[in-house]
Amino acid sequence: MDFLSLPGMSEYIETTRLLYRHGWAEGSGGNISMVLDGVPEDAPVKAVFPLSPDTPAPEGLSLVITRSGSYMKSIAADPEADLCVLRIRGGGAELLWGLKKGGRPSSELSSHLLGHEARLAADPKHRVLMHTHATHLTAMTAVHPLDERSFTRTLWQQCSECMIFFPDGAGVLPWMPCGTDMIGRATAEKLREFRMVIWAQHGVFGAGSSPFEALGLIEIADKAAELYLLTAQLCVINSIPDEGLRRLAEVYGVTPREGWLDI
Ligand code: 2HA
Ligand code: ZN
């Protein structure tokens, strides 16, 4: 079985490179997982990673995820060492491919598993979850109230694309330790409602039906956060008013999150 030829794999690998080029994947920062279609039922199991009983994982789900400690800058050079294909079965994660030099799946595996379950319940086309240290969004969490309505409204007001691409807004979580079931569960709760969840003083989780869609969502939000930071100390005299945001939503046939526009 050639796992690298599964649908979405080449786009997934290209995305790892782009995250590094964006400057959002310093050191071993970030992780990506993608639900896989087309993994044979009888693919041999090479190892099993036990899952915490507190992480009820979607039974039978197959996914590819980055290795814990892998560097986005070098995944493309040797995907079979830095990625793994897992199948969730009987409370464990069966290794079907990858980790050829050893290691474990990403420390955020529980966030990804719970998150996929949440997103698949909301949208059957969902496939990808991406965690990355988007610089401007993370910086914005230091200087902007974390209330998610107000945080989203500030992003929407910066540039037209935000309302078009995330009319559903962004969830925001206060800082908490990463790599824990606690942040995994909190993220999954947010992902039931949002395709993007910002982790204060850390980074962001984005969801999509493909790697490029999830990446694009984060790119647009991070651009808006950059515009906000560039102008936050200046005397801002123009931004998109709520009437304009409402009009954008009408033109593009999207529905702003209920109650998040003042008109
Ligand atoms: O994978 O970014 O949050 C490394 C991290 C943990
Ligand atoms: Zn991180």
Image (cartoon, grey):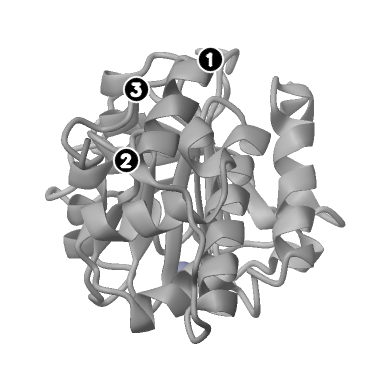
Q: Is residue 1 above or below residue 34?
A: above
Mark 2 residue type: Gly
The mark total stands at 3
State the mark number for residue 258.
Answer: none
Instruction: Evaluate whether residue 46 shows in this view.
Output: no
Query: What residue occupies the far right of the structure in this picture?
Result: 77
Helix, strand or loop status at disc 2: helix
Identify the residue at image location x=65%, y=78%.
26
Amino acid type at image mark 3: Thr
Dot 2 and dot 3 residues touching (CB under 8 Å): no
- Which sits in the foreground, 39 or 232? 232
**236 sits left or right of 116 in the view:** right
Q: Position of residue 212 (x, y in %)?
A: 67, 36
Residue for badge 3 = 255
Respond yes or no on whether mark 1 lies under 8 Å from ligand 1: no
The residue sitting at the bottom extreme is: 233
Q: Nearer the viewer, mark 3 or mark 1?
A: 3
Which of these two is toward me, 33 or 170? 170
Q: Give the mark nearest the N terminus, 3 or 1.
A: 1
Nearer to me, 121 or 213: 213
Q: Residue at x 24, y 68 (%)?
A: 146
The residue labelled by disc 1 is 42
Dot 3 lies on which element? loop
Say above or below: 191 vs 232: above
Q: CA distance from mark 3 to mark 1?
A: 43 Å
Q: CA distance from mark 2 to mark 3?
A: 23 Å
